[in-house]
Image (cartoon, helix red, strand yellow):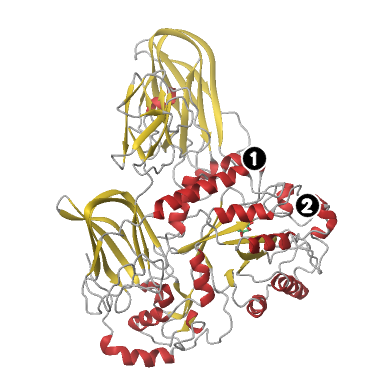
Amino acid sequence: MGYKKHRILKQSLLGLGVFLALAGCFRGDEEDRQRISVPPGATEEQLIDLALEVHPAPRQLSWQKLEMTAFLHFGINTFTDQEWGDGSDLPELFNPTKLDPRQWIKTLKDSGFKLAMLTAKHHDGFCLWPSQFTDYSVKRSPWEGGNGDVMREFVDACHEFSMKVGVYLSPWDRHEQTYGSEAYNDYFVQQLTELLTNYGPIDEVWFDGANGEGPNGVKQEYDWSRYFSTVRSLQPEAVIAIMGPDVRWVGTETGFGRETEWSVIPIAYEAADSTDSPVTSKGIFRPQINPMDYDLGSREKLIGARELSWYPAEVDVSIRPGWFYHANQDNLVKSAEQLLEIYLTSVGRNAVLLLNVPPNKEGKIASVDSLQLVNFHQSLEEIFRTNQLTGGIITPSTSRKRLETGYLSDGSLNTFWEPEEDDASPSISVEWDQPHLFGMMSLQEPIQEGQRIEKFILEAFVDETWQSIAEGTTVGYKRIMHFPTVKATRVRLIFPEYRGPAPRIASWGLYKDLPQVYFEPKGMAFSDNLRITLHTDDPDAVVYYTLDGSLPDVQSDRYTGPIELYGTTEIRTFAVSPAGTKGFVKSQLYNKARYKILLEHAPDIRFTAGGSLILTDGIRGGTQFDNNRWLGFQGTDLEAIIDLGTMTSIDGVTLHFLEDIGQNIYPPDYVDIYVSPSLKNWRKVGHILPESRDASPLPVGLDLNLDRHLDNIRFIKVVGKNHPIPKGEDSEEAPAWIFIDEITIQ
Ligand code: FUL
């Protein structure tokens, strides 16, 4: 374990003060500490010292503390079933029958969200408020006779439920005729001014970077600094997100943040020896970073920086595949369990979550979405209700001042632990008189004072030795670690690496996970019978299950020992902890195969679907290649021998393949079929070519059929010839894939 990259600063504090003054950092003015310019020639150590002085502006700190914020994508697209309108859809189409922003905000409030953000105007240019500067708005819709104002109703609802307000205004406008000329910048600022003056306090303004062509086929040069200063002068407390200086896009829309997430980011680079500082003004900068970079703020990244900024991450993700509501995605709403995972990997990775929940054509959040939101929120509450550290004896390695009881669990960033600067191995230990169970850890730094921690390790004393349970890098506002449940009476938290003289911890929590059920073995195909064992993290939890595909509840069968399967079965199960906490329902499918099957070449280790028997289990695997229902072969042919068990006759063979060109997955060029009574003397009975047709942009399943009556056979051999060279110009491309999920014998 490499201890301590940091330097003890004691002897150089005076020098640091002078250096910071030179660097343009003025103590006491938090606004100024959001950005610090770096004097030319700064050494790595000086850069680190400067990075420690970069703090969030008050508006950024308030925003970060919201943790969970929500997007509401609603507009003309909701009625045309589109994601991006081209600006030509008639405003008459906008006609919600039961618009209910109170229902949106109540649902979000009950689910733990603290800010809601409405798409006042999306790329199509249609305005949800009656802007004076265009007719392409609710004014020309039949809704409320053209007298309605969605923005007003939304803001009123936010005020009623004490929800903070955010506004999304798309700079790209595919309807407005002035788009592409300087007049559009005036138009945009006028619209911004309407939204920021007529609707009370606004806490977040979201500017998307999309910059396509407008109705005249011309792109716009956005006047960002004018947009930003409009926001700053009208709503100085509002953070400006994405294209703005206060909040950074995390770089994906998957819901997963980076494991190492620095909020202090170098925002401009120059050759280290250049004396020409690119950023000297106090103007509001437009970020010069690539938000998708893997590393944005490590020590290595700081080298060469000319300016450092507090620039924290926001994770935007939709509860559905699309940003706007589409009825055909009602069955694709993310589950409470997926939402919990997103929370842990966004808020739990030093970011703010911006979860999109799009209202439907009626003008309401659909019940499928709200059900998952409510369940997600319940699970959050369950997990984080009881900090297992309460009641333990907490002992720090050293403390600059006394670590008062409750400092680490009082929910305040202002009361924190800080070891002595000469503490070579800063750590905090906890001891209970009874063993405790936990599967999650939460940590917070007092980020109002900057971000310091570079590495932490949680250890538990198990089987008479200290064992590492979880290790991470950055903490920042919040870091949550999720790990297999541990039972221990002693734990310790170690900080081997940090910036500055000492790490600081404002909160530390250990929590019980929801009770989980594990299957042994996991879902697979089997040939005769199969014995399944269910395990739980908490040995005292009670497990309920069903075998008929129905949702289990506490009236269902209680698990007492291994379950014997004789036919295709889906096991659905959940556990209840001794304290009454329910875990998520988990299910696994066990398929009884009709025939034994032998593969000549093994599939890729990542795509074995639990074994080749799945090819004769009578069930098709959908169209997602990685859902553990498909066997995948890269660069090799498919060669399989099926044993029908006895001498028999058949009427044909059907093979089901996947085509997913984007993933380099092709149907075989041809399939040859042979039969034999005895594994010898194979007789070729078919040569099947896929029908020629245009490749689909979406993954599709394809049947290849042999329609032929055959007598006196026991074994069938199928050979699928892999596509020789992948399509595309790049000769370095990887070999093509074959994916197969089923071979049916008629
Ligand atoms: C993107 C937009 O193009 C999407 O439609 C959506 O609004 C998303 C949040 O930002 O850039």
Residue 244 in the image, given as x and y percentages of width and height:
58, 72
Residue 57 placement, left or right of 614: right
Instruction: Work out whether mark 2 precedes mark 1 in sequence or the reverse, and give the earlier one.
Output: 2
Quarter in which the N terminus is drawn: bottom left
Whether residue 208 is visible here, answered yes or no, is: no
Q: Which residue is mark 2?
A: 94
Residue type pointed to by label 1: Asn
Label 2 sits on what residue type? Phe
In the visual, does 105 lie left or right of 495? Answer: right
Residue 171 visible (yes or no) = yes
Which numbered tag is attached to residue 328? 1
x then y, percent, for residue 547: 43, 25
Choose mark 2 or mark 1, whichever is in front: 2
On screen, residue 338 above or below 238 = above
Tell me the SS state at disc 2. Answer: loop
Q: Is residue 179 left or right of residue 21?
A: right
